[in-house]
Image (spheres, rainbow, N blue to C red):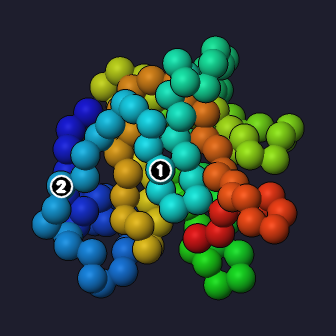
Amino acid sequence: MSTITLGQAIDRHGVDVLEHLDRDLEVPVLAGLQFQGDVAIVPTGVAGPLDPATDPVPAEGVPVVRGENGGNTHLLLADGPVTFSSVTSGQLAIGVLTVPDEATAWLAHPEHGYVGIAPGTYEIRRQREQAEEERLVAD
């Protein structure tokens, strides 16, 4: 697990971000609770016990939330043998992510940049908001 700059992440994984985001800034790799727009990365301790994920993240990544109505996709990428298993039950749960030691997962989004995810097991979730009615947060 190593910290890289936004520019290095773009070069390595091929997912570009909006021009105003500084390519020289370091992308921290964190093990705690993180958010990227409408997506939450929740560590196992907070999310409760989770079985490790089993499906390898391919080189082209896994779209965990696809862009809708002109929005952009949140794409899960990996450096090392990272696994992700989709969850089909529940409106907010998207899946389980397992990052083994010596690996790093990345969540890329054109508007938000990259989020670095340290070794551990996480639940990937959508956020919701309460307005006149409960609804998923939109990017």
Look at 66% across and 63% down and name the residue there.
Answer: 137
Measuring from the top left, give residue 77's x and y in whole percent. 47, 50
**Which corner quadrant holds the N terminus?**
top left
Rendered image quadrant of residue 108 = bottom left
Say if mark 1 contacts mark 2, CB within 8 Å: no
Residue at far left of view: 24
Question: Can residue 139 be seen in this snapshot?
Answer: yes
Pointer 1 residue: 35
Residue at far front of view: 132
In this view of the protein, which residue sits in the foreground, 120 or 15? 120
How crowded pointer 1 is (Cα within 10 Å; few <14, some 14-19, many 20+) is rated as some
Secondary structure beneath dot 1 equals: strand
How crowded pointer 2 is (Cα within 10 Å; few <14, some 14-19, many 20+) is rated as some
Q: Amino acid at mark 2?
A: Glu
Q: Is residue 133 above or below residue 18?
A: above
Pointer 2 residue: 26
Q: Amino acid at mark 1?
A: Phe
